[in-house]
Image (tube, rainbow, N blue to C red):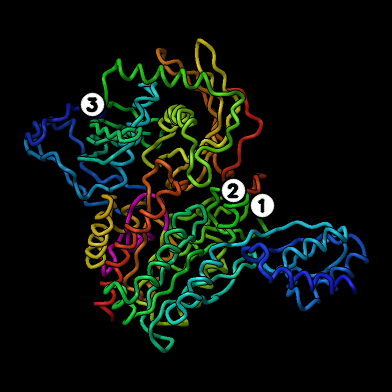
Amino acid sequence: MKWILFFAALIGLSLCGRDKFFGDQVFRINVRNGDEVNKLQELVKSDNLKLNLWKSFSSLGHPVDVLVPAVSLQPVKFFLNSQGLDYSVTIEDLQIYQEMDSIAGDFPDLANRVKIGHSFEGRSMYVLKFSTGKGSRRPAMWLNAGIHSREWISPATAMWTARKIVSDYGKDPAVTSILEKTDIFLLPVANPDGYVYTHTKNRLWRKTRSVHPRSRCVGVDANRNWNASFAGKGASGNPCSEVYHGPHANSEVEVKSVVDFIQRHGNFKCFIDVHSYSQLLMYPYGYTGKEAPDADELDEVARRAAKALASPFGTQYHVGSISTTVYPASGSSVDWAYDNGIKYAFTFELRDTGHYGFLLPADQIIPTAEETWLGLKTIMEHVRDHLY
Amino acid sequence: MQPRQQALPAPGGPRPAAPLPALLLLLLLALRGAAAAPAGSEAPGEASGWQLDPELPHGLLQKAARAALHFFHFRAGSPSALRALASVQRGRARINSKKECQVDLEFTTERYNPKEGEEHLGKCSAQVLFKNEKPGPTINVTCTRFMEKSQRQQEDYQLYKHMQQLKTPLEVSSIPDSHGHIDPSLIPIWDLAFLGSSYVMWEKTTQFLHYYMAQLSSVQQWKTDEDAIDFDYTVLLHEFSTQEIIPCRIHLVWHPSKPLKVKYHCQEPQPPEEASGTEEGSAVAPTGFSNY
């Protein structure tokens, strides 16, 4: 037992200003014999280290997954190495979660990090809630980003936007008045498993990472999985397809988490989904070519937003309904939102138009976020002035 | 019935009357079930004007412009002549009895990888015939020159010399990298890869399928001698309507004053459920490259 105390002491050292580690990690430990099982059990039970068993002991030969908080990384690694335990780090930390926490910490009266669920692989799904008022059902707007994991400019823009909202509140009359009347919920990484996968294995992965018993192919297109003409035109029933809609609507826990939250809240007026690339600003429908009842108003708002977006750098966006502007797409988040009473439903396809595509250079992140912000504000101001 | 190849009328001028048998219905091209605008017909003698029909799907003209540029790049065979689409100025489309779609359009272009401070805007006009799901549209395209032919040749020779000085074997894994970054000394390689990809993308384009080069994912061989650059590489193409990533192995041979030679083999997207497939849904580099 002596080694437990030793490592608890190391934790103390960790807390006293050693290198800062970003985020939690999951260690996959291969336990090969009863002795190793015992050692691991003791380690996990130790209070100080605050470890969390993800995939528990089933039998020898099956690896054990342990969630290790940032502060415990060093001592746990030291322990595993010194005890000769075989392990690997399975999940890269999500720096974005760190940043979200930091924003909430810096502006506690305005921003809150809220957990709305978890991903297929067990990662938390966090939104930032921006609110100036009391009460849990103020009219609200939802900003959705990163549902297609390879579209990195989307979560990047979302995080810049989060910082912008908190910094400009009280200074920019538009932001201030928007937040006086409505709450804003921002989900920067709607597909965390996919996002991590694009960092570790395949930069161009699009779908979730859900596993299906009857297929060798992994993942569902999370933006074909919503209950809006599910499995209609513009989605595929082939699990290996990039636009696979999934076995049924909301089969993806990432999608279901958002649906449940929004439905429980019951007072959302606006839903904006952010993608890349193509430079488009679109509104329902994707699942049909028929005009949405509010198409005229949505089109007018979108045109004004696109004009605002073009003002700083001249970036041109095309505007129109999803099906006539890109292609038919069923089961999309925006169509679901609209058909569920959220009138101001838009989807952005950010920069560029194909030169770099998904691999947009980092030096374009801030200009993209800045121009997009002007478009978002146009929409949000309109929503503020047309609450229903 | 073959659509009549018409010379593009002068801007603003009235359209000459077209003989009835050759008249085609003015139809919005259906994009895999996308909404169709009401069909209209052109009566002979009616001046229908040369304008951007707001009923044309935004996508169709852009697709046609890109296809025209892919073809233009291959035909020019010059990395210094590469262009990027700026915007479509005007266009129109019609479908003939064979369900082929003819698109006439004018568009502006910029240089593909402009150097610091460079700003070249060019104009192109094109006729693109999409052959009802058969890939490789027939294309007629002319573009205004960015620069004199001699200057372009000079730039090509400079590129050629630069490439010959690159240290081999090229230690290149991904261009651009995950963050969109490319080492400036490697931009010519990206340009050359894009040149070869243009040929592939043109050959694969239909009215429903259009492509972008997402990434140069690996270089199998880079040989330079007095005669040519011998470049064997893999790109990942992004097909927009299916969202699939398609790895293509390309072998090109380039010399500034000779026509470009390209051979390729693409790994076609996912097999149906029953066939044994790979575990990954996208972007798997091809193994077992067969003779082409």
Occupied quadrant, residue B142? top left
- Tell me how far mark 3 sits from mark 1, CA to CA: 51 Å
Give the residue displayed 51% in from the left and 18% down from the top.
Answer: B164
Magenta range is A275-295
Q: Quadrant of the N terminus of chain A?
A: bottom right
Q: What residue type is labelled 3?
A: Thr
Of the pair B50 and B2, the residue shown nearer to us: B50
Q: Mark 1 points at which residue?
A: A216
Q: Of helix, strand and loop, which one carries label 1?
A: loop
Residue, disc 2 = A202
Per the image, the residue denoted by label 3 is: B144
Q: Is mark 2 on a helix, strand or loop?
A: loop
Main SS class of the magenta portion in the image: loop
Q: Do labels 1 and 2 share a chain?
A: yes
Q: Observer-nearest residue: B1 or A35?
A: A35
- Of residue A347 and residue B218, the one placed in the foreground of this image is B218
Say which quarter of the image contains residue B205: top left
- The answer as to whether the residues below labels 2 and 3 share one chain is no
The answer for which chain carries disc 1 is A
Q: Are marks 3 and 1 on the same chain?
A: no
